[in-house]
Amino acid sequence: MNPFKRHRAGRFATFALGLVFSLALMVPASAVGPLYGSTYPSKITSKLGRGIGNLLFCWVEIPIEVNEEIQNTDPVTGTVVGIGEGLFYTVQRLGLSVVDIITFPIDVYGNNYQSIQRTEFPFIDEVE
């Protein structure tokens, strides 16, 4: 085996492991405490984390919408309509994630740093 290729594969594995570890650090270990979510630093880091997470996982909207439409209609119609809706929500989530990342220290929407999307992340349903 070519040592250059082996070295490149090792670099990629190290990068992937570092990325996974970094993303794991962004998720709070426990959302408890008297000041959690109410201080300025926790609000802006939450907004930044939401923006990065939505930037990385905005594409998940497509299979979610396809699955939902297939369950509500037949497979052919559900796939076509789901892809269309999924692309719309993907572009929307991508755009809002870029806004969240660029403006994370500022309360742009005027709603106490909350998301204006239908769900905060694509694969987590809102709990009512």
Image (cartoon, rainbow, N blue to C red):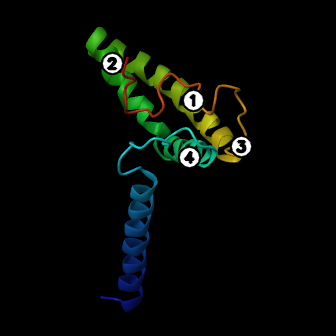
Disc 2/disc 4 C-alpha distance (Å):
34 Å
N-terminal-most mark, 3 or 1: 3
Q: Is residue 119 above or below residue 76?
A: below
N-terminal-most mark, 2 or 4: 4
Q: Which residue is mark 1?
A: 115
Graded by Cα atoms within 10 Å as few (under 14), some (14 to 19) or many (20 or more), the crowding at tag 4 reads few
Q: Amino acid at mark 3?
A: Thr
Tag 3–tag 2 contact (CB < 8 Å): no
Q: Is residue 94 left or right of residue 34?
A: right
N-terminal-most mark, 1 or 4: 4
Disc 3/disc 2 C-alpha distance (Å):
32 Å
User: Which label lies toward us, 3 or 2?
Assistant: 3
Q: Position of residue 24 (x, y in %)?
A: 39, 56
Quarter of the image with the N terminus is: bottom left
Q: Which residue is mark 4?
A: 42
Disc 1/disc 4 C-alpha distance (Å):
14 Å
Q: Nearer the viewer, residue 56 or 124?
A: 124
Q: Is residue 125 above or below residue 49?
A: above
Q: Which residue is mark 3?
A: 103
Q: Is residue 120 above or below residue 105?
A: above
User: Which label lies toward us, 1 or 2?
Assistant: 1
- Callout 3 secondary element: loop
Residue 107 sits in which quadrant?
top right
Q: Which residue is mark 2?
A: 68
- Callout 2 secondary element: helix
Residue sitting at 52 percent across and 31 percent down? 90
Disc 4/disc 3 C-alpha distance (Å):
15 Å
- In this view, the residue farthest toward the top is 73
- Callout 4 secondary element: helix
User: Which label lies toward us, 1 or 4?
Assistant: 4
